Image (cartoon, helix red, strand yellow):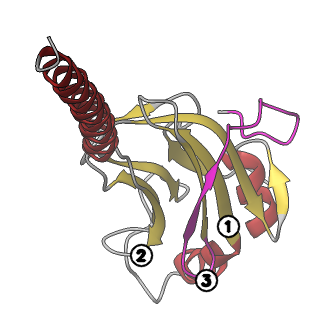
Amino acid sequence: MLGAVPEKKETRTASRYEAVIATLIGLLAVCVSAYTAYMQRQQVRAAVWPILQFDSGNAPDIHFTLANKGVGPAIIRNVIVKVDDQPVRNWKEALEKILGPGEHLCSESDMSGYVFAAGESMTVFTPRDANNNPLTFDKSNPFWVQMNKERFRVTVEICYCSTLGECWTLRAGGLTPGTTTKTRRCPTRSPSSFQQ
């Protein structure tokens, strides 16, 4: 009988070790699972990340473009267009600030509420001459010369989101390089928001 007691003690000690090892393996499995879920979330975020760019050009005509250089769609929530840091409600108002009062022709596309697919680019604004033709590169045309110079007075703030609800604000235009900053959420439309 005396020999049986150490056997029970050894069995209890072995059971404790087994329980501790099983607990550590369980914790390790939970950690690996959490890390795998985190990495999958990062991969999904990278797979739907939009990157908007706004720019103006003068060849073959004067125009403003918006493009999505990212890999996922960009859902535009709010747009503010400014001339000399003053918000304008539409492109016709922008032209009046740039060229003065009068009838100014242009072609325009709506940016507000638009969903830009990955790789999509769109000309959002092109001023036109009295014959309703785009202002093509012509240094002898005073209207082209003025618009080419004054287009740098136009800037934008575009708040957009990915399909996962992550949002950014693009500030671009003028003579400074565009910047994109992460934001918690896009502001709601206001009186200073751009209306098409």
State the image coordinates of residue 178 (x, y, percent, origin top left).
55, 72
Amino acid bearing label 3: Thr
Residue at position x 68%, y 38% in the image: 186
| Residue occupied by mark 3 | 176
Amino acid bearing label 1: Val
Q: Which residues are magenta?
A: 173-195
Residue at position x 51%, y 81% in the image: 141
Q: CA distance from mark 1 to mark 3?
A: 11 Å
Residue at position x 37%, y 53% in the image: 67
State the image coordinates of residue 159 (x, y, percent, origin top left).
62, 45
Q: Nearer the viewer, residue 178 or 91?
A: 178
Amino acid bearing label 2: Asn
Magenta region's main secondary structure?
Answer: loop
| Residue occupied by mark 1 | 154
Under circle 3, the secondary element is: loop
Placement of the C terminus among the 4 image quadrants = top right
For label 2, count other residues whose C-alpha is less than 10 Å away and answer few (under 14), some (14-19) or many (20+). some
Q: Can you tell which of label 1 and label 2 is closer to the viewer?
A: 1
Q: Is residue 168 magenta?
A: no
Of the numbered discs 1 and 3, the one sitting upstream in the chain is: 1
Q: CA distance from mark 1 to mark 2?
A: 14 Å
Q: Can you tell which of label 3 and label 2 is closer to the viewer?
A: 3
Placement of the N terminus among the 4 image quadrants = top left
Q: Is residue 101 visible?
A: no
Q: Is residue 29 left or right of residue 42?
A: left
Q: Is residue 114 left or right of residue 68?
A: right
Of the numbered discs 3 and 2, the one sitting upstream in the chain is: 2
Under circle 2, the secondary element is: loop
Residue at position x 22%, y 34% in the image: 21
| Residue occupied by mark 2 | 58
Of the numbered discs 1 and 2, the one sitting upstream in the chain is: 2
